[in-house]
């Protein structure tokens, strides 16, 4: 698997996670039970870092060999 293929995979994962976050936010608006709202918010909070990391890794793997690309410090060795 090449880095560009990995980038596409990360991008696809990020889109799927974001779609789920949007879906959960819609469920929160329609939910009346405070306990259910709490659980939905908790799940959103758990998915948000995964979404962010997938987007960052998609960008990193897409531009890894570009000389002008400023690599994210989080993933630098």
Image: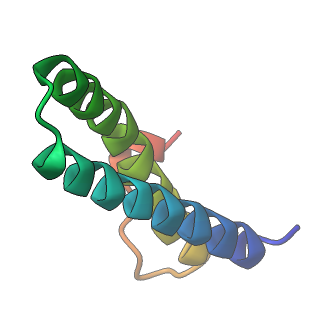
Kindly tell me whether residue 56 is visible in this rendering: no
Question: Where is 35 relative to 30, above or below?
Answer: above
Q: Residue furthest right?
A: 1
Q: Is residue 32 left or right of residue 69?
A: left
In the image, what residue occupies the spot 41% across and 76% down?
69
Question: Where is 69 relative to 39, above or below?
Answer: below
Q: Front-most of 37 and 47?
A: 37
Residue 46: percent from left, percent from top: 36, 30
Residue 24: percent from left, percent from top: 31, 49
Q: Is residue 13 left or right of residue 76?
A: right
In the image, what residue occupies the spot 53% across and 39% down?
77
Question: Where is 33 relative to 77, above or below?
Answer: above
In the image, what residue occupies the spot 53% across and 77% down?
63
Q: Is residue 52 left or right of residue 30?
A: right
Q: How is the image coloured?
A: rainbow
Q: Quadrant of the N terminus?
A: bottom right
Q: Residue furthest top?
A: 35
Query: How many numbered callouts?
Result: 0
Residue 14: percent from left, percent from top: 49, 61
Residue 8: percent from left, percent from top: 65, 75
Kindly tell me whether residue 16 is visible in this rendering: yes
In the image, what residue occupies the spot 70% across and 78% down?
4
* Residue 43 occupies quadrant: top left
Question: Where is 16 relative to 4, above or below?
Answer: above
């Amino acid at each position: 698997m090449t880095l560009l293929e990995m980038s596409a995979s990360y991008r696809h994962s990020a889109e799927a996670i974001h779609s789920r976050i949007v879906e959960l936010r819609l469920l929160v608006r329609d939910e009346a039970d405070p306990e259910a709202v709490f659980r939905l918010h908790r799940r959103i909070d758990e998915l948000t870092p995964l979404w962010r990391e997938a987007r960052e890794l998609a960008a990193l793997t897409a531009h890894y060999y570009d000389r002008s690309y400023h690599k994210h410090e989080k993933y630098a060795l």
